[in-house]
Amino acid sequence: MSARHGRSWLRVWLSSRDSGARLAAQADLAAHEGPAPAGPSVFVDPARRMQTLMGFGGAFTEAAALTWQQLTPAAADEFLQACFSPTQGHGYTLCRVPMGSSDFGLGNHAHADVAGDFALEHFSIERDRRHVLPLIHAAQRVAGRPITLLASPWSPPAWMKTNGEMNHGGHLRPECRAAWAQCYVKFIQAYAAEGVPIWGVSVQNEPQAVQRWDSCIYSAEEERDFVRDHLGPALHAAGLAHVKIVVHDHNRDELLQRAATIYADPEAAKYVWGAGFHWYVEDHFDHVQRLHDAWPDKQLLFTEGCQEGGPHQGEWEVAERYARSLIADLNHWTVGWIDWNLLLDEFGGPNHVGNFCSAPVLADAGRAALHVQSAHAALGHFARFMHPGGQRVLCAATREALECTAAVNPDGSLAVVVLNRSDVALHFNLQVGTRHAALHLPAHALLTVQADAH
């Protein structure tokens, strides 16, 4: 906790449903030596450290990029500052980009779209240069530091699939596996040439889902074999062994058994950095913990989540969904958390199949202003105060209604996030080491407390 004239102080930020506060700075609080008084409490031990954090962010979809390009210059810069500035905004450092088309774009497209081109002579990222890459480049300039980027395919090119189209599932044709693995290599190399290094790739977005949009089905065994026999060797042969491979990239419900199938094969597992997961079914936070416990050498990454079914403008409940997932995922050994679309239009699109969703930032109809949602504030309670290279630390509350997590940053500062989803305000004592402070958390509210760890 920071010292001021011989006393210890805490800095506090609050977001609240009822007051309308969004990441609002509160009055500094004095911290006192000695044990905390009796009553509800949140306990933090900064010396007990767990996983190292990679950061937070969202996805550079074609929909987000196109919407950003349509904004007025002032609104476009406001968006970039809000998301990527490390001093004026959230300072995002961990993001995702579709490798080819997803539902959040203007239509199906592949980088290798010439049928039968097994040599990939016609491979091209020209379409990425229209929308996605300009947004990434702008984000890089505002961030002023590296953005860790995960690339995920929604579907191989139609000609490589058993159903002959990019939508409605289908499988990767066995004779196309080697060529498809080379598509990852060429994508990584092409992005590097544009000044956009790719940190990692997932094998397939949602490999168990037959969608009316871009999708492809892999059984756990098919994913394992593709990594072992094609993708892993292709990356290594191309001098890209440093590029991480993320498996599963689907919901938490089947995270454990899917990853177990792959990790049980040592020849496949040696290529795999860890598993990614989404939130679109039941929570199953315990599955994340169990996978860590079984394979502590493999990492866990939240790779996608959003509020489905339209834009949901102004709904506080979305913020609570974000905050609850962030807290629980971090507490179960997740190292980073990637939101879905960084930005969408007023309808929750564009989306080439009408699968509209919400985003933390929405553009107004005239593209001259932004509608910043409560989910953006929720993400900021973590991203602004828990930095890459920091470590989660031991944190627990004496009341279930006080959902909490904490991390120590590389500079020694401590960030504690506490969520109250109940209908009553809660008073509690924050105990950090030998010091404590009294805090008030309104009903349906979220706060971040920042202090020195020493």
Image: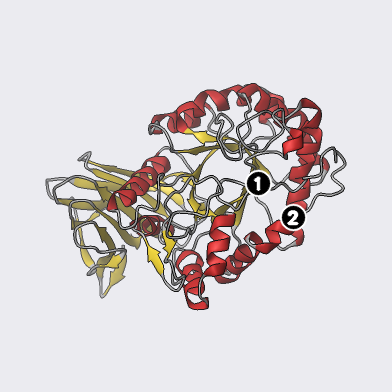
In the image, what residue type sits under mark 1?
A: Asn
Closest to the observer, 379 or 236: 379
Query: Label for residue 126?
Result: none
In primary-sequence order, the first of circles 2 and 1 is 1
Q: Quadrant of the N terminus?
A: bottom left
Residue 18 in the image, given as x and y percentages of width and height:
19, 58
Residue at x 57% of width, y 66% of height: 139
Relative horizontal placement of residue 90, taking residue 169 as reference (left or right): left
Real-space Cα separation, disc 2 to disc 1, in angstroms:
14 Å
Q: Position of residue 419 (x, y in %)?
A: 27, 49
Task: Specify the quadrant of the image occupied by residue 286.
Answer: top left
At horizontal 49% and vertical 32% (from top left) the residue drawn is 292
Per the image, the residue denoted by label 2 is 125
Q: Name the spot of residue 329 as percent of width and height, x first.
A: 41, 41
Q: Quadrant location of the C terminus?
A: bottom left
Instruction: Note whether 165 is above or below 240 in the view shown.
Output: above
Q: Secondary structure at mark 2?
A: loop
Q: Looking at the image, which is closer to me, 194 or 306?
A: 306
Q: Residues within 10 Å of mark 1 (few under 14, many from 20)?
A: some
Q: Residue at x 66, y 62 (%)?
A: 133
Q: Position of residue 104 (x, y in %)?
A: 55, 50
Q: Is residue 196 visible?
A: no
The dot on residue 108 is 1
Residue in front for this viewpoint, 36 or 302: 302
Amino acid type of the residue tagged 2 in the rendering: Ile
Q: Is residue 125 left or right of residue 69?
A: right
Whether tag 2 and tag 1 are in contact, CB under 8 A, the answer is: no
Q: Which quadrant holds residue 20?
A: bottom left
